[in-house]
Image: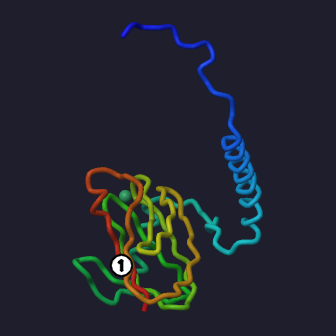
Amino acid sequence: MAIKEPERIWWKPYTRDEKIWVAVSLLWMFTSFVFMPVYHFAGSQNPPYETYRVSPEEFDKLVEAMIEKYKVGEENGMPVVHPDPDEPVFIRASMWQWYPVVELEKGKTYKIHLSSMDIQHGFSILPINMNFMVLPNYDYVLTLTPTTEGEYYIVCNEFCGMGHHMMVGKLYVK
Ligand SMILES: [Cu+2]
């Protein structure tokens, strides 16, 4: 096969179908663009934006104080806490664990504080698939009202090194 010069005009003119698809995608893009700010005000599922600065040392002290006050047991060497719904709950992320295991009561509203001891982690509640970012030096406050009893897993969804795939925590709703 000989090498030939390509045709000067190799593309085909738009067909009717292609024009329709371009119009549909443009319309959809515009709809999403408008929907985002509208949903910010109209929706009830916006991620919370209450945050504070906190050093890993300070946060660790808060976690330990909560464990001392509300520890109800242990699971695989990990303390299990059952905090009072009026009190803040602290969950600590570090390579490679979520600490401690928390028991919540169905229908009660909690303020769950998340922070990291080292690098960025991702707080993902499974199987309901709610995802939040956990950063060192930031206290991210999640206002959460569990509506379904059960056992949930907290999976790290931000790659954080060797043990990332084993970074699984537990959350109970009773
Ligand atoms: Cu992680």
Ligand 1 has an atom within 8 Å of the beta carbon of the residue at disc 1: no
Q: Determine whether 52 is above or below 73 in the image.
A: above
Q: Position of residue 24 (x, y in %)?
A: 71, 50
In x, y percent, where is residue 54?
A: 52, 61
Q: Quadrant of the N terminus?
A: top left
Tell me residue 66's x, y (percent).
43, 80
Closest to the observer, 81 or 24: 24
Q: Quadrant of residue 15?
A: top right
Crowding at mark 1 (Cα within 10 Å: few <14, some 14-19, many 20+) = many
Above/below status of 32 relative to 173: above
Q: What's the image's color scheme?
A: rainbow
**Percent x, y for residue 110?**
55, 82
Q: Nearer the viewer, residue 63 or 119?
A: 119
The reply to whether residue 25 is in sight is yes
**Mark 1 — residue?**
101
Q: Residue at x 45, y 65 (%)?
A: 123
Q: In percent of the image, x 50 and y 91: which residue is there?
A: 106
**Taking 15 as reference, is 57 above or below it?**
below
The residue depicted at 39 percent of the width and 54 percent of the height is 118
Identity, as a three-letter code, of the amino acid under mark 1:
Val
Q: Quadrant of residue 168?
A: bottom left
Please state, as top left, top right, bottom left or bottom right, where the C terminus lies in the image: bottom left
Using the image as rendered, state which of residue 14 and residue 150 is in the foreground.
14
Question: For numbered disc 1, what is the local secondary structure?
Answer: strand
Query: Residue at point 55% right, 91% down?
Result: 107
Q: Is residue 104 left or right of residue 99?
A: right
Q: Classify the position of ligand 1 by quadrant: top left, top right, bottom left or bottom right.
A: bottom left
Q: Could you tell me how many numbered marks the image carries?
A: 1
